[in-house]
Image: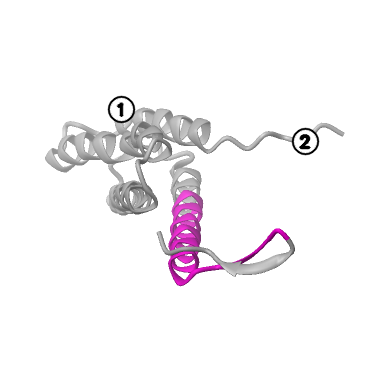
Amino acid sequence: MKRKVYDLEDRLINFGVIIIEAAESMNKKRYAGLYLSKQLIRSGTSPGIHYGEAQAAESRKDFIHKMKIILKELRETRGNLRMSYRVNLFQSSRDIEGVIAECTELIAIFVKSIQTAERNGRTEKKGKVKPINGRTEKLKNR
């Protein structure tokens, strides 16, 4: 059986496309619809664009910082989607709940990734024990 390849960058790009479509379906005759649709496009497309930057981070600290920016944008997007949905700004709200669910899943992925990166960083700083040439030696602090 062929395993599905999991590509977070593609998932974020697809999410951005869905966000653009959702923003374009908002009622822009209402001031809130015009304002929130523009903000939704900014915050909802940002994670897909910034993910490449996180992958090219110069250090673990830089990686964590960039991942936290993506997480912040995802949380802003979810808040915007929920608010816009509750005040019926979407002309076609057929699957906005699904978009909100996808955003929530992405948030969970980034929360866990950040926690893992932070935990691994603390382990390295403490001096993880690793066998070297049959002996156990402490790794130097980085």
Image coordinates for residue 102, horizontal then vertical, percent: 50, 46
Residue shown at 49%/34% (left/top)?
9
> In the image, which is nearer the foreground, mark 2 or mark 1?
2
Which amino acid, mark 1? Answer: Glu
Identity of the residue furthest to the left in this view: 31
- Asked whether, in this view, residue 46 is left or right of residue 31, the answer is right
Asked if the residues shown at circle 2 and circle 1 are in contact, with their CB atoms under 8 angstroms apart, the answer is: no
Is 122 magenta? The answer is yes
According to the picture, the residue beneath numbered tag 1 turns out to be: 24
Is 16 magenta? The answer is no
Q: Is residue 31 above or below residue 119?
A: above
Image coordinates for residue 48, horizontal then vertical, percent: 39, 34
Which circle's residue, 2 or 1, is located before the other in the chain?
A: 2
State the residue in front, 124 or 9: 124
Instruction: Determine whether the residue tagged by mark 2 lies in a helix, strand or loop.
Output: loop
Residue 116 tag number: none
- The dominant secondary structure in magenta is helix
According to the picture, the residue beneath numbered tag 2 turns out to be: 3
Residue shown at 38%/28% (left/top)?
21
Place residue 90 in its image quadrant: top left
Q: In which quadrant of the rendered image does the N terminus lie?
A: top right
Place residue 89 in its image quadrant: top left
Q: In which quadrant of the rendered image does the C terminus lie?
A: bottom left
Place residue 7 in its image quadrant: top right
Q: Which contiguous range is marked in magenta?
A: 105-133
Residue shown at 29%/47% (left/top)?
84
Q: Is residue 16 above or below residue 71?
A: above
Image coordinates for residue 32, horizontal then vertical, percent: 16, 43
Which color scheme is applied?
one colour
Which amino acid, mark 2? Answer: Arg
Image coordinates for residue 37, horizontal then vertical, percent: 24, 36
Identity of the residue furthest to the right in this view: 1
